[in-house]
Image (tube, grey):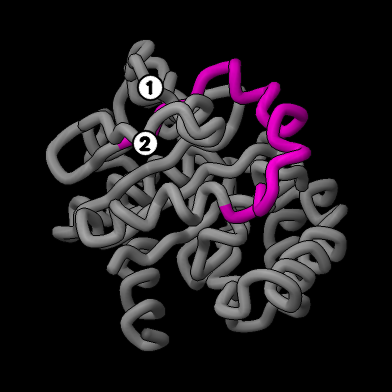
Amino acid sequence: MAIVISLLNHKGGVGKTTSAISIGAGLVELGKRVLLLDLDPQANLTLSLGIGRQPTSIYESLRGEADLAPVEAKPNLDVIISTLDLSGAEMELINEAGREFILRDLLDPLHDDYDFVIIDCPPSLGLLTLNALTASRYVYIPLQTEFLALQGLVKLKQVIDKVRFRINKELEIGGVVATMYDARKVLNRDVVATIQKHFGDKVFKTYIRDTVALAEAPASRKDIFEYSRNSNGAQDYLDLCKEILERVNGQE
């Protein structure tokens, strides 16, 4: 049975898509079968892995026109692609009965094919994100270690709490990932201290260092392990994935 994890932050530019790809690829490095689901109309995850236009994307599936159609990015790492068409999905589905459960129902037939499903959510708190939270067991919050990244965290937590109370009783915040971290910067250290006060042991012990290889990898249409296996970024995400497995094994 696949463990479904949503990566969510309604602030853009915090390393959400990079984290989704790198966590997925890191779990594959550790012997897991992973499905990445691009639920962002910007389709940055799809573009970053160099996957071209396919007959079926998440948009057609949400509209009920097709089942989910995983595309192999590399062995044991599949992707459900997104397209710009997805930007119209929220308006098109607004009158659908049970609209918040569409993604969960679509994922049901795939649960036995994967160990993890990683959902890259859009930077908003609309219907697409609600579908992701309804389908997920855990939410991971990537958080850039800058002052402005802290703004809106209370609202984000309120949304997650409402979904857990009203729709998905199993949903919980599985962790907060500190990204773009530079230990030399006092501000970065202060932000980490602040989120640790707010989220306690939910904050992962592994911080993702600010590494140029993480920015370069999408331009080469590769994940960080294919692009620069010995980089700080690859090492950090591999350590993070080991920590994720420890937490999941301790909670399941």
Instruction: Please tell me which residue lies in front, 217 or 82.
Output: 82
The image shows residue 167, relative to residue 177, as above or below, that is below
Report the Cα–Cα distance between label 2 and label 1. Answer: 8 Å
**Total label count?**
2
Give the mark nearest the N terminus, 2 or 1.
1
Q: Quadrant of residue 27?
A: bottom left
- Which residue is painted at 37% across and 57% down in the image? 108
The residue that disc 2 covers is 67
- Which residue is painted at 74% across and 78% down in the image? 165
The reply to whether callout 2 and callout 1 are in contact (CB within 8 Å) is: yes
- Tell me the quarter of the image containing the C terminus: bottom left
Crowd rating for badge 2 (residues with CA inside 10 Å; few <14, some 14–19, many 20+): some
Q: Position of residue 29 (x, y in %)?
A: 19, 52
Q: Which residues are magenta?
A: 79-101
Q: Which mark is residue 56?
A: 1
Mark 1: secondary structure: loop
Q: Amino acid at mark 2?
A: Asp
Residue 31 lies left or right of residue 209; in this view the side is: left
Q: Is residue 233 magenta?
A: no
Mark 2: secondary structure: loop
> Mark 2, mark 1: which one is toward the viewer?
2
Q: Position of residue 53 (x, y in %)?
A: 38, 11
Crowd rating for badge 1 (residues with CA inside 10 Å; few <14, some 14–19, many 20+): some
Residue 178 lies left or right of residue 54; in this view the side is: right
Q: Amino acid at mark 1?
A: Thr
Instruction: Please tell me which residue lies in front, 65 or 236.
Output: 65
